[in-house]
Image (spheres, rainbow, N blue to C red):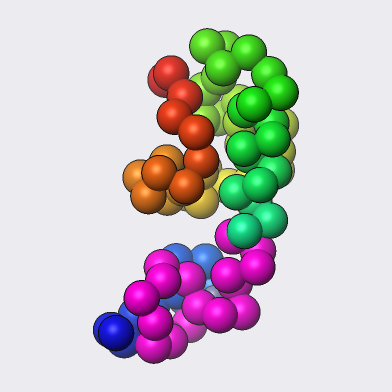
C-alpha cells in the first residue's frame, strides 16, 4: 500500500485505489452511469466532451476511468 493523493478530492489516504475511501462510492456511481450511457447509445458518436456534457461527469474523471479501463472503450 502507498500513501496517495485522492484523484477526486485531493486528500491524502493510504490505499491501493486512486481515490480515497470517501470518494470510492462516487467513482463507482460515475462508472455505472457512464457504462450505462455508453451501452445504451451509439458508441461511435461519442467524444469525451460529449460524454461529460450528457452525464455531468468531469473530463478529468472520464479520462481517468478510460485510462484504468473502468468503463467500456469508446472510439474517440
Ligand atoms: Zn477523495
Picture coordinates of residue 58, whole percent (x, y): 58, 47
Picture coordinates of residue 53, whole percent (x, y): 67, 33
38, above or below 46, in the image: below
41, above or below 26, in the image: above
Tell which quarter ligand 1 is in: bottom right
- Relative placement, left or right, of 36 versus 20 is right
Residue occupying the point 64% across, 26% down: 39
Q: Quadrant of the N terminus?
A: bottom left
The answer to whether residue 53 is visible is no
Residue occupying the point 37% across, 50% down: 68
28, above or below 2, in the image: above
Instruction: State the extent of the magenta-drawn residues as a range.
Output: 11-27
Picture coordinates of residue 4, whole percent (x, y): 34, 80
The answer to whether residue 31 is visible is yes
Q: Quadrant of the C terminus?
A: top left
Picture coordinates of residue 75, whole percent (x, y): 43, 18
Q: Is residue 62 magenta?
A: no
- Relative placement, left or right, of 46 versus 68 is right
Please state the total of marks drawn on the protein image.
0
Query: Which one is nearer the viewer's eye here, 47 or 68?
Result: 68
Residue 40 position by quadrant: top right
Q: Is residue 21 magenta?
A: yes
Residue 56 position by quadrant: top right
Amino acid at each position: 500500500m502507498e500513501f496517495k493523493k485522492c484523484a477526486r478530492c485531493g486528500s491524502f489516504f493510504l490505499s491501493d485505489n486512486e481515490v480515497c475511501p470517501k470518494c470510492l462510492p462516487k467513482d463507482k456511481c460515475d462508472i455505472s452511469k457512464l457504462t450505462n450511457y455508453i451501452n445504451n447509445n451509439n458508441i461511435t458518436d461519442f467524444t469525451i466532451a460529449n460524454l461529460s456534457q450528457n452525464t455531468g461527469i468531469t473530463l478529468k474523471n472520464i479520462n481517468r476511468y478510460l485510462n484504468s479501463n473502468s468503463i467500456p472503450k469508446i472510439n474517440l
